[in-house]
Amino acid sequence: MFTEKKSVGEVCIVCNEVKNLGIHLYTSFICTECELEMLHTDTSNPNYKFFVQRLKKVNTPQIYS
């Protein structure tokens, strides 16, 4: 689930910088700048692998029954 939120200083999982605007992907925060860069990066671009590695840090919440 994606939610856009203006927050006070969260660390982006991609650039590791404190940013005020971005999205939450499960329990992780991605700043707007990184989100836009990822969306416009072609799979042949060397940065693509970097983004994939960073997105592996996203913590998917566990659902317990």
Image (tube, rainbow, N blue to C red):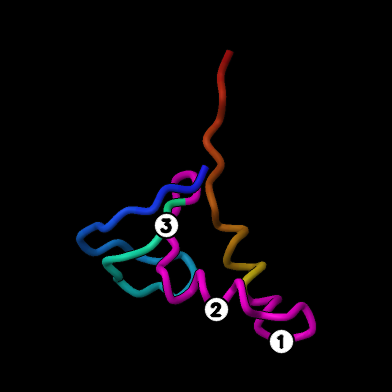
Which of the two discs, 2 and 1, labels the residue nearer the N terminus? 2
Could you give the CA–CA distance between mark 3 and mark 2, rounded to whole angstroms?
14 Å
Name above or below for residue 65 compared with residue 55: above
* Residue occupying the point 64% across, 68% down: 53
Q: Taking 20 as reference, is 43 left or right?
A: right
| Amino acid type for the residue under numbered disc 1 | Pro
Which of the two discs, 3 and 1, labels the residue nearer the N terminus? 3
Which of the two discs, 3 and 2, labels the residue nearer the N terminus? 3
| Amino acid type for the residue under numbered disc 3 | Ile
* Residue occupying the point 56% across, 41% down: 60
Q: Which residues are magenta?
A: 25-50
Q: Which mark is residue 46?
A: 1
Q: Which mark is residue 37?
A: 2
Between circles 2 and 1, the one closer to the viewer is: 2
Q: Residue 62 in magenta? A: no
Q: Nearer the viewer, residue 63 or 22?
A: 22
SS for callout 3: strand
SS for callout 2: helix
